[in-house]
Image (cartoon, rainbow, N blue to C red):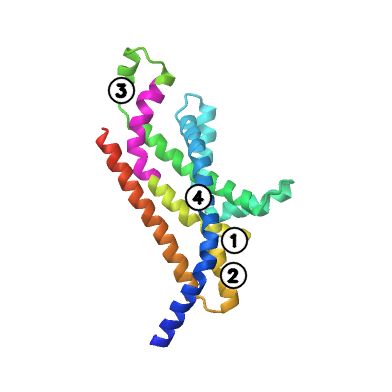
Amino acid sequence: MNLEQLQTIAQSAWQSLPTLLSALPITLGFVVAAMALGLPLGLLVAFARLSNLKVLRGLSGLFVSFIRGTPLLVQIFMIYYGLPSLGITLSPVVGGVLALTLNASAYLSETIRAAILSVSKGQYEAAYSLGLSKRQTMRLVVLPQATRVALPSLGNTLIGLVKDTSLVSVITVVELLRSAQLVIARTFEPFGPYLMVALLYWLISSLLEVLQRALERRFSRGM
């Protein structure tokens, strides 16, 4: 690779930046929506997996197994291209958010479930001895401790979700990756735009890692 080629790549990367930045809010919107919906859903699935009811444990376990055992790309295709055959048609944005939410919730549920199980039985007994109900014990005693345990994994899931948003480009959502593809279709110079996309994903992930470490330090001081 000579100097002229490097200059061409750098120029194409820089010229693609305004277009990519205009698509960045869409990518971040998918991340926020999928996490905001996936976290409470994951909490419900975790509770279902810890339930004394075999039906709930079985259905929630099947859901988690299926989602974790199939590629996210296939799940996106099933929701966006498969559901219309059942009479359910979703827009690309709704289909993408739904797929990302369901996928994230399965992984989040396992993180939450493991964190809840890590709380010792002595904590439950101490709470009951103080007159707290099961619901109060879970809300006031167990979940705060489980949050500290789950925080690193929750952060990793969020960072993974940022990168997973690139897959919604296959259903015509104009997020970061799709924007780069549109730029390349005009300029016929692929490396520069793809490099810039990679740098933007890296920057977002790095910022989230810094935030994650700061939250971990704050929670550790409260232990």
Q: Which residue is more in the foreground, 149 or 18?
A: 18
Quarter of the image with the C terminus in it? top left
Q: Residues within 10 Å of mark 3 (few under 14, many from 20)?
A: some
Instruction: Please tell me which of labels 1 and 2 falls first in the chain.
Output: 1
Whether residue 194 sits left or right of residue 156 in the image: it is: right
Label 3 to label 4: alpha-carbon separation: 35 Å
Residue drawn at 59 percent across, 51 percent down: 96
Residue drawn at 33 percent across, 18 percent down: 127
User: CB of mark 3 within 8 Å of CB of mark 1?
Assistant: no
Label 1 to label 4: alpha-carbon separation: 14 Å
User: CB of mark 3 within 8 Å of CB of mark 4?
Assistant: no
Residue corresponding to mark 1: 174
Quarter of the image with the N terminus in it? bottom left
Task: Find numbered disc 2 in the image and state the secondary structure of the residue it sits on.
Answer: helix
Label of residue 123 in the image: 3
Q: Residues within 10 Å of mark 1 (few under 14, many from 20)?
A: many
Depth check, mark 3 against mark 4: the one in front is 4
Whether residue 137 sits left or right of residue 17 in the image: it is: left
Residue corresponding to mark 2: 182
User: CB of mark 1 within 8 Å of CB of mark 2?
Assistant: yes
Q: Amino acid at mark 4?
A: Val
Label 2 to label 4: alpha-carbon separation: 22 Å
Instruction: Please tell me which of labels 2 and 4 falls first in the chain.
Output: 4
Residue 193 x/y as whole percent: 49, 72
Q: What kind of secondary structure does the magenta stretch mostly adopt?
A: helix
Residue corresponding to mark 4: 31
Label of residue 129 in the image: none
Q: Residues within 10 Å of mark 4 (few under 14, many from 20)?
A: many
Label 3 to label 2: alpha-carbon separation: 56 Å
Give, as a single range, the part of the protein colored magenta.
137-154
Residue 183 x/y as whole percent: 56, 72
The reply to whether the magenta stretch includes residue 186 is no
